Amino acid sequence: MALAGCTATDVVPILRKKRAPLQKLEINVKGNEREEHPRIFTDIHVEYVFYGEGLKAEDIERAIELSTTKYCSVNAILAASAPITHSYRIESRATPAVATATAM
């Protein structure tokens, strides 16, 4: 969760500065941990889902690049111990937000 929050706080302002028509951003992070303790990550994948009509791939790629190589300290810390891959997709329309809760 820290990685998603860190990169989002970079990517969104970068796209706003470029006046990109971003309506919504979702970030999905998946990682694998080793079996023995300490259970550190062995690999991590970050998927960005951008919503908005007229978003440009080059603007998105540059925003992700700046976040992952320059601004996001969480990415830098995790990348020192596990490879991190990134992917993105652009959806033209954002679906309405739905609040969900899970009972523990």
Image (cartoon, rainbow, N blue to C red):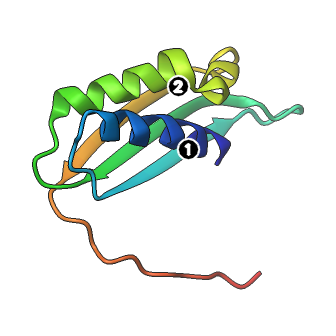
Residue toward you, 6 or 85: 6
Separation (CA) of disc 1 from disc 2: 12 Å
Q: Residue at x 23, y 40 (%)?
A: 19
Quarter of the rendering occupied by the C terminus? bottom right
Per the rendering, the mark at residue 4 is: 1
Q: Residue at x 43, y 81 (%)?
A: 98
Tell me: residue 92, above or below residue 95.
Answer: above
Q: Residue at x 58, y 27 (%)?
A: 72
In the drawing, does residue 67 fall left or right of residue 34? left
Tell me: residue 51, above or below residue 62.
Answer: below
Q: Amino acid at mark 1?
A: Ala
In the drawing, does residue 41 fall left or right of residue 61? right
Tell me: residue 9, above or below residue 77.
Answer: below
Crowdedness near tag 2: few (<14), some (14–19) or many (≥20) residues, C-alpha within 10 Å = some
Mark 1 or mark 2: name the one nearer the start of the chain: 1
Label 1 close to label 2 by CB (< 8 Å)? no
In the drawing, does residue 11 fall left or right of residue 22? right
Task: Report the residue that reaches farthest toward the left.
Answer: 54
